[in-house]
Amino acid sequence: MTPALRPAAPADARALAALHALAFPPAEAWGADVIALMLEMTGGFGAWEPGRGLVLARAAAGEAEILTLAVAPAARRQGLGARLMASALAGAAARGAAAMFLEVAAGNAAARALYAGLGFAEVGRRRRYYADGADALVLRRDIVANTVDGDAAGRV
Ligand SMILES: CC(C)(COP(=O)(O)OP(=O)(O)OC[C@H]1O[C@@H](n2cnc3c(N)ncnc32)[C@H](O)[C@@H]1OP(=O)(O)O)[C@@H](O)C(=O)NCCC(=O)NCCS
């Protein structure tokens, strides 16, 4: 059986940071302090599967954004990234958001394929947005509450 995703709480920040560091290069990994702040922000929420993957998001004023999405290398291509995104979309719908935004590096083929498959479309480009000079694409997807997988608590 697929384990249920857990809601991410500020108290999980150290374990979430360790997991984030598995998925991103050291210069891009987020520390526990940053992750705790994200989860304490108004509208901040997230979901995770310990040791395998996490998503952090924020919903405010009818819109939501993905703050980060990370799946450990050993857990990739098993549908977890898509489940985490479904959970974030459900969590955003439950918080009244009608659209989800995110930024992705133009060269991140895996993430771009995942987001395209979930119905995200490019709505902007931020030139040289990342420290390595890569452009960021801004993607957007409508959230229609009753068409998002998962229940109101963001479980999928
Ligand atoms: C991007 C990432 C989150 C994907 O997680 P994942 O758990 O492997 O994704 P899923 O298994 O749910 O994949 C869903 C679909 O996305 C696409 N996809 C995922 N990884 C892919 C890859 N390496 N190449 C091409 N398509 C890919 C496929 O369409 C896949 O469906 P399929 O496996 O049936 O072909 C993961 O690779 C990761 O953590 N990367 C490093 C961090 C990162 O880039 N985060 C996103 C920043 S915006």
Image: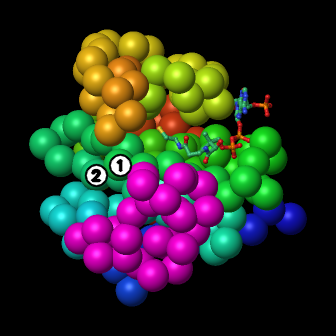
**Which mark is in front, 2 or 1?**
1
Where on the picture, by quarter, is residue 135? top left
Residue 110 vs 149, above or below: the answer is: above
Residue 133 picture location, percent across and down: 35, 27
Q: Which residue is mark 2?
A: 58
Please give the count of numbered marks on the rendered protein: 2
Where on the picture, by quarter, is residue 31? bottom left
Q: Which residue is mark 1?
A: 67
Q: Which mark is residue 151?
A: none
Decide if residue 80 is in sight here.
yes
Secondary structure under badge 1? strand
Do the residues bearing badges 2 and 1 touch, measured as CB atoms within 8 Å? yes
Residue at 13% in and 42% down = 61
Residue 21 vs 33, above or below: the answer is: above
Judge by depth and name the residue closer to the eye, 110 or 150.
110
Type of residue at label 2? Arg
Judge by depth and name the residue closer to the eye, 82 or 22.
22
**Quarter that holds the C terminus:** bottom right
